[in-house]
Amino acid sequence: MQRLKIILNPGGMICLCSLLFVSSLMLEAQEGLGGTDLDTLYAREEFRLGVQAYNRFAFNEAILSFEQALSFRPVDPLIMDWLGRAYYRSGMEETALRQWRLSVAAYSPASDDALLLGSRIETVRNRRSLLTILGDGVRYVAAGRYPGRYDTITIFKQPTAVLPLDDGSAWVVAYGSNELVRIDVNGIVRQRQRGPLNGFDRPYDLVRGNDGRLFLSEYRGGRVSVLTSNGEWQSYIGSKGQGNGMFVGPQNLAVDEEGYLYVVDYGNRRISKFDPDGGFILSLGTKSPNFSGFLSPTGIAAQNGRVYAADSVAKRIYVFDRNGTYLGILIQEGLTGPESLRFLPDGRLLVADTNRILLVDPNSAVIQEMGVAGNSRMRIVGAAMDQNGNVLAANFQENEVSVMTRFADMAAGLFVQIDRVVTDNFPKITVELSVQDRLRRPILGLDGRNFLLSEKGYTVAEQQFLGAAYRAETADIAILIERSQRTVGFQDDLAAAVRDIIRSLKGRVVSLISASEQPLKEQADEAHWLQSARGNGASYTSRWRFDLGLRLAATDLLPGEKKRAVVFVGTGSMGDLAFEQYTLSELAAYLANNGIVFHAVMVGGNPADEALQYLCDQTGGQLISLYQPEGIGPVIESIASHPTGSYILSYRSQLPTDFGRAYLPIEAEVYLLERSGRDSTGYFPPLE
């Protein structure tokens, strides 16, 4: 510990006022960073300013303050940790990782801080994409279950199918108890539907139509029920019998891109096709010179003009075209008893095969075993992937729904990040945090029971769950317009694109940015948006700056809604100065690390630069043409339903503040079934 120097005035007397003042400041400096020297005092003040700037989303300002603090305290692990956070949120991931490694080295090797930071480093380093990755060797293991019975209480009986919903919950088709049960991610029953007055009669499978309606097959009832998106009964399709449009034991269902419904008519050993209004069109799979007929038709899936049908006795998957013509066998070996088939977003089939979950590539016919649920005597009748990347398996024999998760995710846990701490109403503290898996996919469906906040190891007082962003029905967007000389001839198209964006958006336009040499905000209110979209002669230049425009547009979104996107409108050519100050990877990280989706609307008909597709892929957006037949409306509307794992909680702090100068720590832990994750940070209360 350094000693305090006693300064004498010319008369040889001690300057007590200066001594007391300096001593007071040094004592204050001990709280948070440790130490009693003046460098610690200066570091502490810069650190406080940096933390406050970070919580205002002023990441560049925070970086400057943290760098200044480190100039006074070069090896302080807490400052280096925060500097890494600021670089990470600013999109500079490699620099963030360097700072975090330095911070880990400065902490005690086995300390909790070092272990937590080491986990964060590993996650960020290994993360490469927002999209689901199901490559070779990926294994799914049991992460939990939704039992049909608790002690003497029956929740549901004999599940046969699962339909995941956008909020993370799922409908479970309960064959044995004649009902639909909606279960959230914690296994809590949120809703039951038992059909019309006469009830469902052995419901078997459930699919969603393109208009949001649900179709439910009723095995013993010999019909298909049409339900609203909330599960309320509306009407029937078909009836018992052997004629066209009639059923004997309807089971599995599928809907193709055009909205046509396919029903596996088990008793009649055929598949019936209906239009979206329930009108019968044709039957396929009956015995013919080219096809020997089904022995036991089970799962079905339809996509890209092909219909795939499983036969559990023949142990095969057959292929037909949309008109019912038999095309051949997709899989004839390697199956033991296939039942349900479901397409995944990447175009592969998820297959329930006795107690196994399989991936089947319809192009190569390659089979990959994803996981096994229990022993070979078990029967998985239906399986589907939910919004959190889990496989939900309807285990008919065990009377439960098994939740299966990637083995790597089980080992690594959840990625929890405290994004912001709001202290304006201290001692009431508001915490904004995000929860993701290790592939950057948001975790949806959490509520207050999944979170635990603590201060210095003690559970906080009055913790409240304030909301989840995935429930929001609106979104914020910023529109970014290319102002290159190539777009001068497309001013009407630019205006049309902005008009369609504003008309289709379920939310608000935060800003409209012209990406010229010096990007600027245009007037984006309703009275001026057409004129703003067209720009003026001075706006267009060969030196237009995509990188600066994108940073400006994205930064405008940070204080607003958690569902947010930048919509770029341009010709697809990026220009010579597109990445003059910020690299493509830094821009992608800035968007992804702050939960901003990037969409690109192309005008002019020229091919788009690969960089635009990269930004879309890394953030979950789409590259679309203004001139496509369906227009850009559906994509813009989808922004408001884009999944996000952002949550807000509050609590009442009970820590001493030293009149607002004390750094107060906070830790957030998140639990979901057998998985967990945590993050720790801190804040400064307002100065008193």
Image (tube, helix red, strand yellow):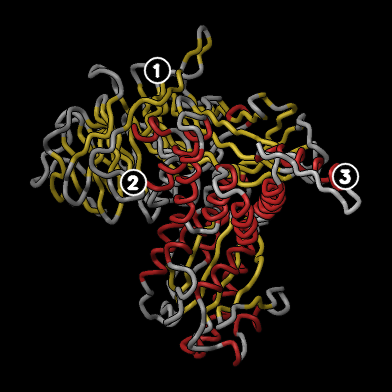
At 50% from the left edge and 40% from the top edge, which residue is drawn? Answer: 106
Which badge, 3 or 2, is on the more N-terminal residue?
A: 3
Of labels 2 and 1, earlier in sequence is 2
In this rendering, the answer to whether 198 lies above or below 321 is above
Residue 60 versus residue 242: which sits nearer the camera?
A: 60
Q: Position of residue 67 (x, y in %)?
A: 59, 56
Which residue lies most toward the left here? Answer: 289
Residue at (54, 29) in percent of width and height: 193
Instruction: Tell me whether the residue at label 2 lies in contact with that at label 1, contact meaning CB atoms closer than 8 angstroms.
Output: no
Q: Quadrant of the N terminus?
A: top right
Q: Which residue is mark 2?
A: 133
Label whose residue precedes the other's in the sequence (3 or 1): 3
**Circle 3 Cα neighbour tier, 10 Å, few/some/many (<14 / 14–19 / ≥20):** few
According to the picture, the residue beneath numbered tag 1 turns out to be 399
Disc assigned to residue 14: 3
Could you tell me how far apart the alpha carbons at marks 3 and 2 are, in whole angstroms? 71 Å
Q: Is residue 16 left or right of residue 127?
A: right
**Residue reaching furthest front?**
11
